[in-house]
Amino acid sequence: MKISSRCMLAAGVVLSLLSGAPSAVQAESRKVPHVQGVAELPAVPRKVAVLGLAALDTLDALGVDLAAVPAPPSGESTVRWPAHLVARYSGDRYVRLPAAARDGGADPRIAGIKDLRPDLIIVDGRGGGQLDELKGIAPIVDLSVSNTSLVASVAQNILTVGAAFGREKEAGDRLHALLGEIRALREQAAKQGTGLVMFAVGNRVMPQQPDARFGMIYELVGIRPALRPDEGQGLSTGRPQAAASADDGPEAKAAAEAAQKERQAAEERYLSEVMAREPDWLFVVDRNAAFGEAKAAQTMAATPAIANSKAWREGKVVFLDQDGANWYLMAGGLGLLEKSVRQVKAAFDAGKGADMRR
């Protein structure tokens, strides 16, 4: 999601802190800028409803007390949250907001929020499109992040939370520490050659261009991408397209199957071409890990173009989602970014990632 002019302030903060210069961060009290405007808060919010997991991760990292959260995974769900978030928010203390309705019917989340009567509603990427439905219930803050300006938008989100809850100093200190770690990681990354971000879903592993959904990881790490933004045009970098439905006729099904095979062949050729460049490091976002499915390492080991690469043989593979701290579910969350920066730094220090290749 592209970010509005609010990022201009954060960009200045980021440039200052990444260069090592100290910066005093001031936020106008109770007028809180965010992705889709400015929220006016008459007082520090006491009853807060959060709709997005990335926003929850940021608020949790900053110690904000909450009233309502996305419903943690139940015993029937395959979705995997990070263990510390499940432990913290599964209790009866919190109103648990269900997933958004997908059938066009009444959204149970909206009803739950109306019943709660919160002082503030916080959304992120996937919930950012519900502002019209939420207006009138309470002030809204959108903590979505930008695919192309990740660090600046995360910085602004941290400052936004600090301003909303009267925690400017705590937010400024946490931001200063995060940007210091990012600066140090980028200094290391400049000596590490090239990197390739890969998105694993099902039995597919797709290279991510710098402007693709998870291309933001190049910016975070600071490593030189093994491919350009304009490469792979027309190829999927996300979830597979839906196949023909059971209601389609034989001709439609045959055409859909042929198109699917053609896309798959093109994706395989593209993957082989990219891996032939021998990127020095592979950074893997694993959607399967978010749902307790077969790990990306299994698919990658069975893919010759990857398994025969130098990076794979040398173990220079960083699985960013190996414990459920998942980029697919909460990209842009503060806790996730801190963990990922430290994970990549540890891999660089050791000269290899955690050995999950088998």
Image (tube, rainbow, N blue to C red):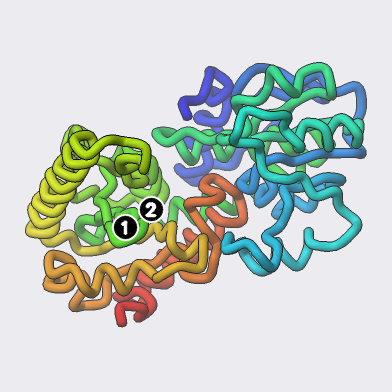
Question: As displayed, is residue 138 above or below residue 260?
Answer: above
Q: Residue 213, image x and y in percent?
A: 38, 40
Q: Which residue is drawn at 8% across and 52% down?
A: 273
Picture quadrant of residue 297: bottom left
Disc 2 target residue: 221
Picture quadrant of residue 307: bottom left
Disc 2 residue crowd, few under 14, some 14–19, many 20+, Cα 10 Å: many
Whether the residues at callouts 2 and 1 have beta carbons within 8 Å, the answer is yes
Q: What residue type is labelled 1?
A: Ala
Which of marks 1 and 2 precedes in the sequence?
Answer: 1
Q: Locate the C terminus and report the quarter of the image it occupies.
A: bottom left
Please name which of the two marks, 2 or 1, marks the residue nearer to the observer.
Answer: 2
Residue 266 visible in rendering: yes
Question: As displayed, is residue 118 above or below residue 70?
Answer: above
Instruction: Report the label total.
Output: 2
Picture quadrant of residue 214: top left
Query: Foreground: 122 or 298?
Result: 298
Disc 1 target residue: 189
Q: Residue 196, image x and y in percent?
A: 25, 55
Q: Residue at x 17, y 49 (%)?
A: 264
Q: Which residue is drawn at 80% across and 50% down?
A: 96
Disc 1 residue crowd, few under 14, some 14–19, many 20+, Cα 10 Å: many
Q: Residue 356, image x and y in percent?
A: 36, 78
Query: Foreground: 146 or 242?
Result: 242
What is the secondary structure assignment of the residue under circle 1?
Answer: helix
**Residue 97 appears left or right of 81:** right
**Residue 78 appears left or right of 348:** right
What is the secondary structure assignment of the residue under circle 2?
Answer: helix
Q: Which disc, if any, is residue 127?
A: none
Q: What residue type is labelled 2?
A: Val
